[in-house]
Image (tube, helix red, strand yellow):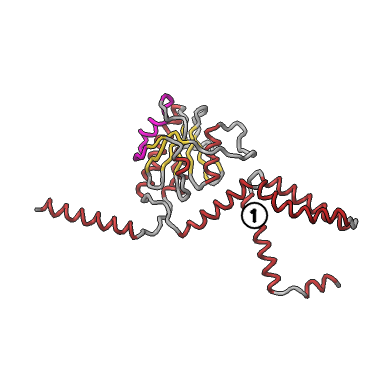
Amino acid sequence: MELITVFESITPLAIVDILLVALVFFLISLFIRGTQAVALFRGTLFLLVLVFVVSNLLNLVAFRWLLNNLITVLAVAIPIIFQPELRRALERLGRAGLVLGPGTKAPQELRVRIVEDICRAAEQLSERRHGALIVLERNTNLQEYIRTGVPLDSYTSSELFLTIFWPKTELHDGAAIIDSDGRIAAAAAVLPLTARRNLPDRNLGTRHRAGLGISEVSDAICVIVSEETGNIAITNGGRMVPRLEVMRLRTILNAFYGNERQASPTWRDRLRAWRGTLRNVSHERRKSA
């Protein structure tokens, strides 16, 4: 009878309310999936449910009172415990809002050329067993990591990558970051290390951990060449694809970076294009004259 009464009392507004709560829990599960917080969240949830069921079945009034008061403490403790995951969730939410905003500034032709430069350099670095860490900036601004390196502001080329990551240079120990304009903004940059415990390989070195770390805190793509084995790997979205051949590396980079959909041109872009057209026209007229 009580169950029938409950179903009779359900209104369309109550269904919407239940669906919203379910959506919140679903989004939380998406944000913490694949992180070390999953086990902690499961353990905490299991303990709370167990204590709640036992206290109600045995009618433990004092224990139930303690449990109700602990909810206030948990409301403060949970944000502290899950602080890294909450930060990543807010960063993902902010990046999702950038879908309608400006995308990568570099034109597609330049991005395709950058992919070719990286692939040629990665192939030779792999043959020579020279370690490398190349980061491609996308929507997430990487200025805080660019500032930790040596400013270059240079066009990309395979020869320049080979020079940067030559073991006897001052710039080889760190990351080369390519900004959204398609230029090497800095070399020898310091990247954040991953905080994950469930790594794909427990023997990953600092270079690979840094590549995973930058992909966890941003939407950047990172190409890694191992100094010990010469293997090429790529990271994106907190995931690593190891032991890549150059052909597959080129395919992945073109899919995630080289062939990205360009954002709609802004009025500044149109003004620059218009000025460039006028310069070309005036230059042709002077030549013909």
Where on the picture, by quarter, is residue 123? top left
As helix, strand or loop, the secondary structure at mark 1 comes to: helix
Decide: few, some or many residues near mark 1? Use Cα within 10 Å; few <14, some 14-19, many ≥20.
some
Q: Quadrant of the N terminus?
A: bottom right
Residue 61 image position (x, y, % from top left): 88, 57
Q: Answer above or below: position of 278 versus 228.
A: below
Closer to the camera in the image, 186 or 115? 186
Residue beneath the point at 52% across and 42% down? 214
- Residue 193 drawn above or below residue 71: above
Q: Residue furthest top?
A: 168
* Residue 163 rendering spot, x and y as whole percentages: 38, 30
Q: Residue at 42% x, 24% y: name it.
A: 168
Q: Residue 167 colored magenta?
A: yes
Number of marks present in the image shown? 1
Q: Position of residue 257 (x, y in %)?
A: 44, 48
Q: Disc 1 marks which amino acid?
A: Ile
Comparing 113 with 73, the one in front is 73
**45 is within the stretch colored magenta:** no
Magenta-colored span = 152-168
> Where, by quadrant of the figure, is residue 36 drawn?
top right
Query: What residue is drawn where x is 43% and y is 52%?
Result: 260
Extreme residue in the right direction? 58
User: Is 147 placed left or right of 273 in the picture?
Assistant: right
The residue labelled by disc 1 is 28
Position above or below: 24 against 256: below
88 displayed left or right of 55: left
**Image coords of residue 10 (percent x, y):** 74, 73
38 left or right of 8? left
